[in-house]
Amino acid sequence: MSDSIESRLKEERRFPPSAEFSKGARVQSHAAYTSMYELSLSDPETFWREETGDLVFRTPWKKVSEWALPHAKFFVGATLNITESCLDRHLGTSARTRAAIVWEGEPGDVRTLTYFELHREVVRLSAALTDLGVKPGDRVAIYMGMVPETAVAMLACARIGATHSVIFGGFSSDALRERINDCGAKVLLTQDGAWRRGNVVPLKKMADEALEKTPSIEKAVVLRRIGQEKCPVEMKQGRDVWWDELVTRTPSENALGLAKKPAAFDAEHPLFILYTSGSTGKPKGVLHTTAGYLVGAHVTTKYVFDLRESDLYWCTADVGWVTGHSYIVYGPLSCGASCMMYEGAPNAPDWGRFWNIIEKHGVTILYTAPTAIRAFIRAGDQWPAKADLSSLRLLGSVGEPINPEAWTWYHRVVGGGRCPIVDTWWQTETGSIMLTTLPGACYSKPGSTGLPLFGVDIEVVKDRGDPCKANEGGKLVIQRPWPSMARTLYNDDARFKDAYWSQMPGVYFTGDGARRDEDGYFWVVGRIDDVLNVAGHRIGTAEIESALVSHPAVAEAAAVGRPDDLKGQALVVFVTLKQGQDPKDLKSKLAEHIDKEIGKFARPDAIRFTDSLPKTRSGKIMRRLLKEVASGAETKGDTSTLEDLSVLAKLRTDEE
Ligand code: WT7
């Protein structure tokens, strides 16, 4: 695989949309895109007034934005209940009886919820949460899998103004506890278990362990997904309540009133906290607020996926990550779209599962990640070949750079050569897609993430902030606030300033390196901070290191990434042991320790024991050297500050 930036920059092919695709699209030409983009920057008031027209505001906004960096407000003066844009507004239209969610469980069970039914479920749960004592501004943790109730849970919180924090079901109980305690959640919503590759992930059991030390939690609501026989759970008296029993209780008059005619909240009311990795050991609680986030998710979904009533749109991300928040829940529902949702693994029971789902339900838009595409390539063309994929009309990619080989395969084998591909660059912090090619308007280039979306003033700059020349590598920065921008890090505003706004005055630093070519297309290289992207999962090296050193046998640890054909990056850790510790058997123990501290998805791909780590004279671990050792590359850089060169020679000869 050649996903290096050099090989991607050699990529000169251009794939324009077909005339037929463009003709039916919302934005039909490059010129139309450009004039919208220019208006969004030169006259944001006019642009956003037009684009917010189909969303529901109780009080219209007075001013598009106000900022004193790093803080910004959008749609100032507006009040709204975000769920009215996602649910209520569709009830008076033909969408009322249209599928909002078409869900397939891993065992093959199927459920469809119309907009009417989704609204009803959200109303019931929000009334029940009110009766449990949840109030506007309270935090509610959600530790669930890919079931429709997870979307119901998020929307029910939003409806009563509670701030949700979804914790990906792959996180361990320790990681769950840390996040619950950081945000001080009052209620946890979870489920007995979730299906994953034919096995049950015992979410409730893991939640029980987490809840042993979470003083803020008063109640845990438990959805029955698997059932007592295959997934027995213990219900703690006074704390735990079954979801079905809760929502079938008669709600109080007040709670029902609030659920049916929900309160309106300020545009900047906190909507959700989502934890993500940064360059220190502690996860960052990225905080998004209401109006700006909704507008970002809505407008990007509408234009990037160019949704029509006849579409069945499928974003394969987990709802525990931001992609699930913006492009399974808030974006598509605010557009009245019909969304496919799938519970399980792409290879359960075999590698044909995705193609089978597309054929069976008639999926028209598929949005997935390069790491999945590469896994499908490896599994073989016979799997997609077996299914009828002719319903597809548009494909999307997200999460990491896509190498041209994977792009071409996706285009040819999945898209039958007829579907445009939108490669979308964005982050947990940006809330919505920032860079892509609008599918009816702009040609795509395999490996490039395209052009800026509306309101996105983005640039590649040198260290001091001067713009780079065409094709010159630099830092990717955003030069003015945008509606769906993260507003702060929960309880850590100083870190928000420091992590994103301190590199260069007045600009947001993304943490990514990039180039922009002579056509203005962006080519994202990847993270240039201490954050890895392993199979589309964002992993902080410092988090891995602090998890490792919390093991009694470990003295020091360094985590680095190494290029990987399948995962994009693989996680390699170098570990020094305390005196008298025997490395024998420790590899599997350390791997299990990571499972426990963070979650299985963060398991290192290689653990290498060493007597010492290469350090500068001032004692800093030289990660750059370790990266080279991990990937088997020759040492290129300057090693003059290396404390003891023999350390490096030794590392190279050590076996993995
Ligand atoms: C990082 C953000 C929000 C998307 C899911 C991941 C990388 C994301 C692309 C892309 C190249 C990409 C960046 C970014 N990334 N999309 N299309 N091309 N790189 O969200 O966990 O917050 O990670 O993912 O490095 O900074 P996230």
Image: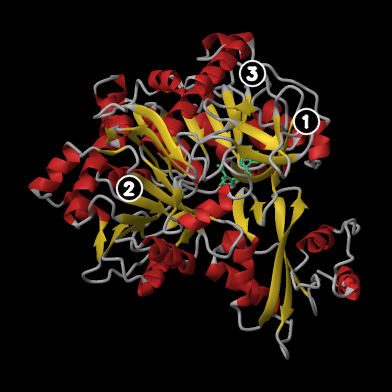
Instruction: Give the vertical position of 239 relative to 164 (above or below).
Output: below
First along the sequence among labels 1 and 3: 3
Q: Report the residue at 42% width, 18% height from top.
A: 46
**In the drawing, what numbered circle is on residue 442?**
3
CA neighbours of label 1 inside 10 A, class few (<14), some (14 to 19), many (20+): some
- Residue type, mark 2 in image: Ala
Q: Looking at the rendering, in which quadrant would you find the C terminus?
A: bottom right
Q: Quadrant of residue 463?
A: top right
**SS of the residue at dot 2?**
helix
Question: Callout 3: few (<14), some (14-19), or many (20+) C-alpha neighbours within 10 Å?
Answer: many
In the depicted structure, whether residue 552 falls above or below residue 239: below
Real-space CA distance between mark 2 and mark 3, rounded to the nearest whole angstrom: 37 Å
Labels 1, 3: front one: 1
Given residues 32 and 586, the one toward you in this image is 32
Residue 172 spot, x, y in % from top left: 49, 65
Residue designated by label 1:
469
Q: Circle 2 is placed at which residue position?
A: 153
Question: At label 3, which amino acid type do we have?
Answer: Cys
The residues bearing labels 1 and 2 have C-alpha atoms spaced at a distance of: 47 Å
Q: Is mark 2 within 8 Å of ligand 1?
A: no
Q: Nearer the viewer, residue 285 or 225?
A: 285
The kind of residue on which mark 1 rests is: Lys
Residue that appears at 57% across and 16% down? 33
Q: Residue furthest left?
A: 253
Say whether residue 643 is visible. yes
Write the residue at 46% across / 24% down.
302
Residue that lies at the very extreme toward the bottom in this rendered image? 580
Discs 1, 3 touching: Cβ within 8 Å: no
Locate residue 617: give its quadrant. bottom right
The quarter in which the N terminus is drawn is top right
Q: CA distance from mark 1 to mark 3?
A: 22 Å
